[in-house]
Structure formats: structure tokens, C-alpha cells
Image (cartoon, helix red, strand yellow):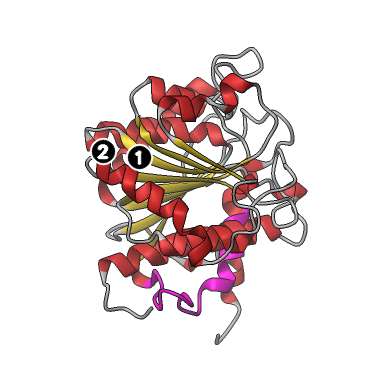
Amino acid sequence: MSDFAFLSQTTFLRADTAAGQPLAVAGIAWDGSTTNRPGARMAPRSIREASHMLCDGTHPWFGCAPGARLGDAGDLALPNTSLERMRAAMAEPVAALIRRHHMAWLGGDHSITLPLLRAYRAWLGRPLAVLHFDAHCDTWTDHFGEPSGHGTWVSEAVSEGLVDARCLVQVGIRSAAEAAARDYVTHAGGRVWTARDLRGRDGSDALRPVLDDLRARLAAAGQPPLYLTLDIDCLDPAFAPGTGTPEPGGLSTSQVLTLLEDGADLPWVGMDCVEVSPPYDHAELSSQAAAHFVWTYLCGRVKAMDPRSGG
């Protein structure tokens, strides 16, 4: 590292603009649907800043780095007082970006995932498979009396035909919920790996059943495109205190990294990382975890592009 000039450059991994790059990140700085602690609108900048310590090296497992293949498209210009206006404003720029780049989206609260899935469904012409890391099932049919929010997007995505429910796999679920919401994904034909299911499991061998089940579901459904949505509160608050609705008893950072690394060969089409709330973070733990997860995902994409690179 020759100097520290990067400290003032707030792009992910110090990337330049996204023009012409196969990989890109963009921020969606919205938290108008938060039901507990706000602050997720500040996460895109915080995650970018946390990523600066990853700029000088290659990934320890993949042996590669996004480097010149990555650009940063900045934050989407969005209204911040109306969920429906925000989602409508997302449609055009999201559609343009996903046609040009393999995207990693920096949220924002989890209500941003529904319009992202709408855009991918329209572009790809078929329902998506989804791997969903979260403490919460996000399957409620209303949002504290409102029809939509950050806790309803799963049921909305299934009912709109955006997601093939057979290929909807949730990991880390553990929050209190009514039975109808808690069992929604299972009854729809998907799979839920609760945090309790995964207690004490770490490393590739112990976590292989999660990915084996996902691979089997993808094969049975004709290999649909796969989308990753990663709510930082899937982690135990010991690893990610800076989030809007922390839930004790969650996953470890190493568990999530193992699943991202070992699943890098899956047919990914994009990802988002949501619900980081910098005002409640301690020592940037949550932003650091988010930056590492997004970096690991992007390194996996580079590895898929060029299997000869490292690893």
C-alpha cells in the first residue's frame, strides 16, 4: 500500500465508474420501511468505506479479486418519503444496470428486494430461485397495517410469480412469528434452515446439506437463475450489532462466508445486502461483515468467469 489516498474515495473497493465493467455495485439508500431502528439508508456509504481495507489483496479462498472488472454506479436517486414512489423510481435505473452488469446492490432496508426481483423477472423472462439469509421470514401479508414493507416482500414475490417457491431457500430464520408467516415458505414448497438447525455446524462438511438441498431444488426446477438476498441480521448480534431488528441466536460470519464460498459455482444473477444500520454499529462490525460478504460474492463471480485464477 503506497499511500492512504483511498480513505477519501468512497466507492466500493475504490472502483471507478461502472461503465464497461462486467461487475458493478450500486447503493439503494432507503430505510423508509424500517419498523424498529432506522439508519439503513446510511449503509451504502458505510459498506463502501469498510471495503477499502480489502483493496490491496486477493481473496484467500478464490485467489482472485474483482479489480478492473468492477465498477461502482453510485447510489440510485430515489425519493425518501414514499415506498411506492421509491419502488417506481427504481424500475428504470435497475433495469438498465442489470442489462449491463452483474450487480451487487447495497441496501437499504429489505423492502428494496421486491422491486429488484421484479426487474430481474422482467429481464430474464422466468421466475427466479432465491437464497435468502435472514433472521426474519419476511412473509407477513401486511406491514403493521400497511400493505407492503420490509417484512412482506417474500409473500409478495411469491404471489406475483417473481420467485419459484420450490427454489426459495431461507437460512438463519429465528425470530418470533405467527405460525402462518413462519410456515409460509415450507407450505409453498420451499425450504427453511432455521438458526437452530445450523447451531454447531461450521465448515464445508457440516454446511454441505444446505447447498446440496439448494442444488437439488435447482436441478428439479430446470436450473432457474439464482438471486441472493442477504439481510445482515441473519448474523448473531455479536457479529452484526448494527442492524434495525437484531435477533440473538444467529449465524456466525464464518458460516455465511463458507456458504458463499462453497456456493460460488451456482447460477447467480445478482445479489443484495441489506439492513445494515451504521448508527447502531460497534467498531463497524456490521459494515465490515457486509463488505466481506459482497466482496466474497464478487470474487466468486470472477472465479466463475476465469476458473484458472487462483483458489
In the foreground, 163 or 57: 163
The reply to whether callout 2 and callout 1 are in contact (CB within 8 Å) is yes
Q: Residue furthest top?
A: 145
Taking 266 as reference, is 275 above or below it? above
Whether residue 175 is visible here, answered yes or no, is: yes
Label 1 belongs to which residue?
129
Q: Position of residue 305 (x, y in %)?
A: 26, 66
Quadrant hosting residue 58: bottom left
Quadrant hosting residue 243: top right
Whether residue 97 is visible here, answered yes or no, is: no
Q: Earlier in the sequence, mark 2 or mark 1?
A: 1
Q: Position of residue 260 (x, y in %)?
A: 46, 59
Residue at image location 76% in from the left, 48% down from the top: 280
Quadrant hosting residue 194: top right
Task: Residue 58: say if magenta.
Answer: yes
Q: Which residues are magenta?
A: 46-67
Residue at image location 42% in from the left, 48% down from the top: 271
Q: CA distance from mark 2 to mark 1?
A: 9 Å
Residue 12: mark: none
Q: Secondary structure at mark 1?
A: strand
Label 2 belongs to which residue?
221
Q: Residue furthest bottom?
A: 2
Taking 38 as reference, is 219 above or below it? below
